[in-house]
Amino acid sequence: MVRSLSAARIIKAIGNSLSLKDSEIERLIHPEEFLDFDITIEKDDGDFEVFKGYFCKHNSILGPADVGITFDDSIDADQIKEKAMYMMLKSALLELPFGGGAGGIALSLKYLSEDELKKACREFAILISELIGRDVSIVSSDYGTNEVIIDWMVHESAKIRGLDDSKSCFMCKSVENDGIEFRGSALAIGVARIVDLVSRCFNNEGNVLKVAIQGYGNVGSSVAKSLSELNAKIIGLSNTSGSIFCKSDEGFDPFEVLKYKAQGKGFSEIPGSNYDTDSNKVLNMDCDVLVLAAAKDQITSQNADQVNARIVVECANSAITEEAVNILEKKGIVIIPNILAQCGAVILNYFEYIQNLNNEHWTRDQVEQQLFSKLDNIISRINEIVSDKSISFRQACYRKAISDLSSKIKY
């Protein structure tokens, strides 16, 4: 049931606090359009395999839905619907003229050859061709997809709708295919900028931030690099194999850690670190900032009391349960929710959309300047709500998004 999803419960709780009508809350919870379909491809060995595909247009209250595409064998209908709800909230919080959406294929990238993956992408692009359009729904990348996959979809879609129209429907393209500069850095640099701004708002002006990161994969390692470039000290890291804690007061060099990983070395072999097989040990570190970049439900009512960070950044969707949120906020911990933490990539979707519509090419400096300006303004607006309403930073984020959405609902 849609109402049981974490995002739906948040919308209902905030909606009730805003005295929204039940009909308004239901409009924000239920998707306008949801489809699932079979994608059949011929494998390299001549056998055929069927994958489940999804497309969800959650709403178009603010504009065309931004439909983030996920490729992962564990994805299911409920996860797609929740991702679509979160995308709606991100766009609203950021004051972007986009609705929310999500889609994808339940497949494992590691078990498909490049040719097999191309076939799946092309079939998916054909099946959604009548569902997208620059004024209806646009497509962007999410977990398991990248500019290569998006470019394949653009190429297939172009056979149906023409190249220029196809490019206007797909974001996260390669720069050579009219994508936006700075794409690969946007999410991580966005997180770093937000952490820096929020920490300054909560009495950490000029102090060096000590950071622990749970989930040292693509997102976690990129965030570590961006934070270290702002002179933060990375004192703890974890992945599925365990946690490591830096022996030196200087913290880890994220680039060096990645170099060792590239050499095939495990976390237990990283020089200058203490290793623990418990991946969750990093959650208990005494630090300024704890970044959650692993999976959902990492901080729960069972371990929230043991969190010792001043700021927790929810880079993964629903990484903190609702029960845990209450515990953390009672401890005075500031939570940067996923709808803000993940905003760098979403803002760039909008920039790419405008760049393509105007037939322009923005430089990296232009993109970075516009991104920082947008983030600075949004953080300022959120802090005004925190002050005016005497509510938590996380509540202010959701309140702003849901209030803005409800004001645009038409019957």
Image (cartoon, rainbow, N blue to C red):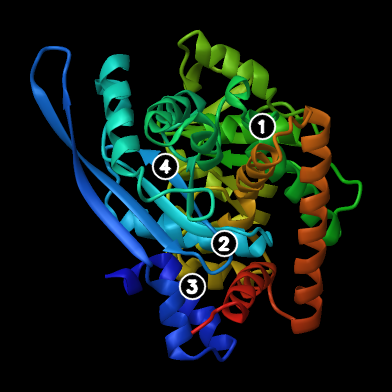
Kind of residue at badge 3: Ile
**Front-lying residue, 52 or 138:** 138
- The residue lying toward the viewer, choosing from 80 and 308, is 80
Give how far across and how far down residue 25 sits, in percent. Answer: 46, 81
Give the total number of marks visible in the rendering. 4
Looking at the image, which residue sits at the far left?
47
Closer to the chain start, of discs 3 and 4, is 3
| Label ID, residue 63 | 2
Mark 3 or mark 1: which comes first in sequence?
Answer: 3
**Label 4, label 1: how many angstroms apart (C-alpha)?**
18 Å
Circle 1 Cα neighbour tier, 10 Å, few/some/many (<14 / 14–19 / ≥20): many
Amino acid bearing label 2? Gly
Q: Is residue 48 left or right of residue 52?
A: left
Residue pointed to by mark 3: 10
* Residue 337 appears in the rendering: no
**Looking at the picture, does residue 388 appear above or below residue 384?**
below
Distance (Cα) linking label 2 and label 3: 22 Å
Distance CA(mark 2)–CA(mark 4) = 18 Å
Q: Position of residue 198 (x, y in %)?
A: 78, 56
Q: Nearer the viewer, mark 2 or mark 3?
A: 2
Mark in front: 2 vs 1: 2
Q: Which residue is mark 1?
A: 180
Badge 4 is on which residue?
Answer: 69
Q: Amino acid at mark 4?
A: Ile
What element does badge 2 sit on?
loop
Label 3, residues with CA under 10 Å away: few <14, some 14-19, many ≥20: some
User: Given this view, does label 3 or label 4 mark the residue nearer the observer?
Assistant: 4
Q: Which residue appears at 51% of the width and 27% of the height?
A: 147
Q: Quadrant of the N terminus?
A: bottom left
**Residue 80 shown left or right of residue 163 in the figure:** left
